[in-house]
Image (spheres, helix red, strand yellow):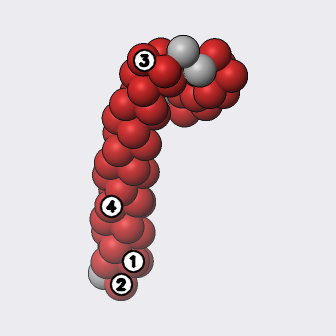
């Protein structure tokens, strides 16, 4: 029975980590999209390229 409890707690921990990772990825993606919009509005090509590269990395 103890093995079942350990396995269950491990699975809960992994599930919680996956939820947190997804939330952080979504938050960062939203921030990058906003920064890309600002870079486009300001005509900042270098920031646009850097941010789109970062976005591509996150979305893999």
Identify the mark nearer the N-term, 3 or 4.
Answer: 4
Identify the mark nearer the N-term, 2 or 3.
Answer: 2
Q: Tell me if residue 56 comes above or below residue 8 in the rendering.
A: above
Q: Are marks 3 and 4 in contact (CB under 8 Å)?
A: no
Q: Are marks 2 and 3 in contact (CB under 8 Å)?
A: no
Q: What element carries label 1?
A: helix
Q: How far apart are marks 3 and 1 (CA)?
A: 53 Å
Return the residue at label 1.
6
Identify the mark nearer the N-term, 4 or 1.
Answer: 1
Q: From the top left corner, tell me how far across and down residue 32 is, in percent.
A: 45, 33
Q: Distance between the residues labelled 3 and 4?
A: 38 Å
32 left or right of 58 in image: left
Q: How far apart are marks 4 and 1 (CA)?
A: 15 Å
Q: Quadrant of residue 51?
A: top right
Q: How far apart are marks 2 and 3 (CA)?
A: 59 Å
Q: Distance between the residues labelled 1 and 2?
A: 6 Å
Return the residue at label 4.
16
Q: Are marks 4 and 1 in contact (CB under 8 Å)?
A: no
Q: How far apart are marks 4 and 2 (CA)?
A: 21 Å
Q: Crowding near pointer 1: few (<14 within 10 Å), some, many (20+)?
A: few
16 left or right of 36 in image: left
Q: Which mark is on residue 41?
A: 3
């Amino acid at each position: 029975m103890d093995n079942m409890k350990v396995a269950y707690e491990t699975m809960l921990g992994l599930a919680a980590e996956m939820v947190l990772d997804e939330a952080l990825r979504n938050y960062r993606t939203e921030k990058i999209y906003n920064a890309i919009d600002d870079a486009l509005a300001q005509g900042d090509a270098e920031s646009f390229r850097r941010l789109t590269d970062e976005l591509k990395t996150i979305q893999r």
